[in-house]
Image (tube, rainbow, N blue to C red):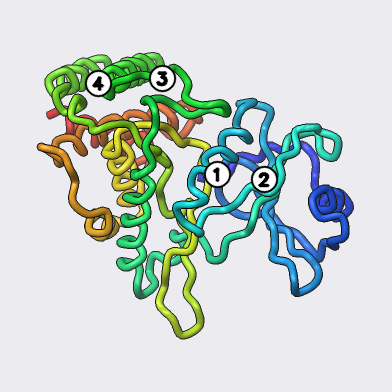
Amino acid sequence: MAPNRRLTFDLDLETVQRIVQSLYPTKEVQGFGRLAGGSTEVYRIDLAGTDTRSLVLKIYPDEPIWQPAKETRVAGWLANLTPIVPRWLRVDESRAILPLRFALLTLLPGRPLRDHLRDPGIESVYRQAGELLRRLHAIPMKAYGYIIGDGIKAPRITNAEYMAEAFGDLFRRFRNLGGDADLVRRLEQFVEASSDLLAESPGPVLCHDDFHQGNLLALSPLGGNLRLSGLIDFGNARAADRLFDLAKALFCCAHEDALSRQPLLDGYGPIDHPEPERALWLYTLFHRASMWCWLTKLGHDATADDGPGGLLRDLHNMAR
């Protein structure tokens, strides 16, 4: 999906120079350009001199108002876990330089993993990604819920309570967007019959909730093996059951590369759940229906096999 353009103005070198010098007063900008992907404006800024690494400029829309604080918070939680996440160096919400809020981040090496899908060594990178996701899930959270700028919105103590509300809200949106009422009824019956799976959660953990080839970076050093080099974009992060996040990662990654599932699982390692496949199936149902709602709301072709149409077909198959 092409990124949504949010800016109503064009950046120029003078403005980018002012942005950089709000952080580094003596640095000179050599050049800048927009980075592909994502739904917000993100730019690479190259600085003059050999002693300074390039930066990333991320420009935030007006809503949600807490988004810069959320990403800064989540990146801070991850800073001691792995070196392959960006650091938020400066967040400016004054609108003195730009009419929108912005942040300056460190630039990670590599390109999105989706650019390497046919490269030798891709399976090894998927295993590394599974290992990284497992480490991320070692960060405990105090409650279940969506993360915003100052913590967890509407925190819930149990996964069963949190997911019951999440499924209820999801099915309401599905109906309101014109989803098949009979399909929703059958899916609701499956969820109700599988509620025991949701009670097995060992506790809430930090979940990326957007773990796919567009947000994973990989690097192929000269003469070396392809390796994982970055994890970006924490705008979807939430506190949830670890299998909720694993299911989303498997679902999204397999959509781009069907061969990704097994090496991701191999890297992730043993799953501590009495019925892991049933649990992953149930969470995948949630993510498929959520993706259908999101794409339908954006106005994507309802019959597209690689979009709402394919997701709807898969949901009908699950309901059988």
> Which of pointers 2 and 3 indicates the residue nearer the eye?
3
Q: CA distance from mark 1 to mark 2?
A: 17 Å
Q: Amino acid at mark 2?
A: Lys
Residue at the location (80% across, 72% down)? Answer: 49
* Residue occupied by mark 3: 155
Q: Are marks 3 and 1 in contact (CB under 8 Å)?
A: no
Question: Residue 287 location in percent, x, y?
Answer: 32, 34
The amino acid marked with disc number 1 is Gly
User: SS of the residue at dot 4?
Assistant: helix
Mark identifier at residue 112: none
Q: Which residue is mark 2?
A: 58
Residue at horizontal 50 percent and vertical 78 percent from the top: 221
> Tag 3 or tag 2, which sits nearer the N-term?
2
Please identify, in this view, whether the residue under mark 4 or under mark 1 is nearer the observer: 1
- Select label 1 or label 2 by which is in front: 1
Q: Which residue sits at x=49%, y=69%? A: 219
Mark closest to the chain's N terminus, 2 or 4: 2
Q: Earlier in the sequence, mark 4 or mark 3?
A: 3
Question: Where is 81 relative to 182, above or below?
Answer: below
Mark 1 lies on a secondary structure that is: helix
Q: Secondary structure at mark 3?
A: strand
Q: CA distance from mark 4 to mark 1?
A: 29 Å
Q: Give the residue drawn at x 30%, y 51%.
A: 254
Tell me the residue that label 1 is attached to: 76
Q: Amino acid at mark 4?
A: Ala
Packing grade of label 1 (10 A; few <14, some 14-19, many >=20) is some
Where residue 160 appears, x then y in whole percent?
24, 21
Q: Are marks 2 and 4 in contact (CB under 8 Å)?
A: no
